[in-house]
Image (cartoon, grey):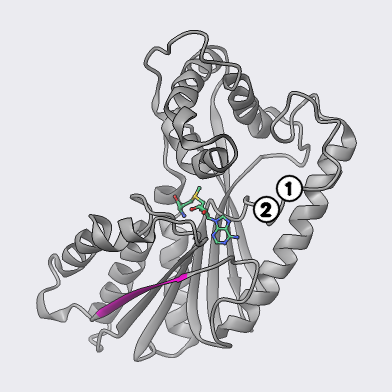
Amino acid sequence: MTCTFVFILRFQFQGSGLQRSLPILHDTINRITNDFNGLPLCFKIANLGCSSGPNTFFVVTNIIDRVHDICLENNCQVPQFQVILNDLFENEFNTVFRLKPLPAFHSKLKEGKGNKCGSCFVSAIPGSFYGGLFPNESIHLFHSSYAIHWLSQVPQGLKNNKLNICMAKTSPTNVFEAYRKQFDKDFTKFLAMRSQETVSGGRMILTLAGRSITDPTSKDCCAIWELLAKSLDMIKEWPTPGINTAYFIRAIIEPMMAAHFGNTIMDVLFEKYQEHVVDHLATNKGMNYNLVISLIKR
Ligand SMILES: C[S@@+](CC[C@H](N)C(=O)[O-])C[C@H]1O[C@@H](n2cnc3c(N)ncnc32)[C@H](O)[C@@H]1O
């Protein structure tokens, strides 16, 4: 796949990266429509690492809305949509299908569109996105947000990364190299798989947490995760209320922390984390950097 754009979004911790990435998403859909010289009869969208929370359908709804607008502007037939959700086998797919998100998604789709609403078929494919998930040349648009920072395995050789839970300012250089190597390996595999599965002219948008400079020890990358490591030294005192930043970071990291430390400590951990973030923001600007990468299959 060929990279067409890399955008760096800079926003305050309280902001939402996904919300800010919508103009890029809209631009990508416009380009797909141009490249295909119209829309396919069935537009196939896959959301990789979809989770089971409020963001599961957030971007998909926006994609479908944009396609509807394009069809209205051009007075053409709205396509059918096939939406395929993917996450690891352990994901709460039952929550997505049985409880709120799916019915809410369907009723939101119909809002204001009446009988012009294209039919939408939602299904799920559990499994790792580091392997093959779809038939060759079958997907028009891949989307994945805040998921490819999950490596396929813990990098080798982290034993001397004492008291840290990931890369930190105090980590020895071999630790940074180990993370870089594992990410290179995983991301190369991820791109190779998606390249096979995307139709020619199809696109992929990836949103992920990043940093403003190449130095992996820079504050805008490490600081917020170092506070999480500090929060693990807890349960001695009870927490006080904190701020939205902790919710944002919790959405990104909680499943990974829960898999390692168990669900029972998550509330206390993130309450403690809120306190650390409040202290941190009292003396630091609290900027957040996200990368949005747009790719095309030639
Ligand atoms: C932080 S959540 C992001 C959820 C959602 N996309 C969002 O933007 O809020 C990351 C999700 O990626 C999933 N994930 C991690 N590694 C994965 C893999 N190899 N294959 C599929 N999903 C994966 C996790 O299970 C988790 O649900």
> Which residue is at 51% across, 43% downward?
252
Above or below: residue 151 compared with residue 64: above
Q: Are marks 2 and 1 in contact (CB under 8 Å)?
A: yes
Picture quadrant where residue 95 is located: bottom left
Q: SS at mark 2?
A: loop
Q: In this view, does 83 lie to the left or right of 263?
A: left
Q: Name the residue under label 2.
A: 151
- Look at the image and tell me whether residue 10 can be seen: no
Q: SS at mark 1?
A: loop
Specify the farthest residue to the top: 237
Above or below: residue 14 compared with residue 134: above
Q: Position of residue 141 (x, y in %)?
A: 48, 75
Name the image quarter holding the N terminus. Answer: bottom right
Magenta segment: 120-125
Name the amino acid type tagged 1.
Answer: Val
Name the amino acid type tagged 2.
Answer: Leu
Q: Mark 1 points at which residue?
A: 154
- Look at the image and tell me whether residue 149 can be seen: yes
Label 1 crowd bin: few (<14), some (14–19), many (20+), radius 10 Å: few
Picture quadrant where residue 192 is located: bottom right
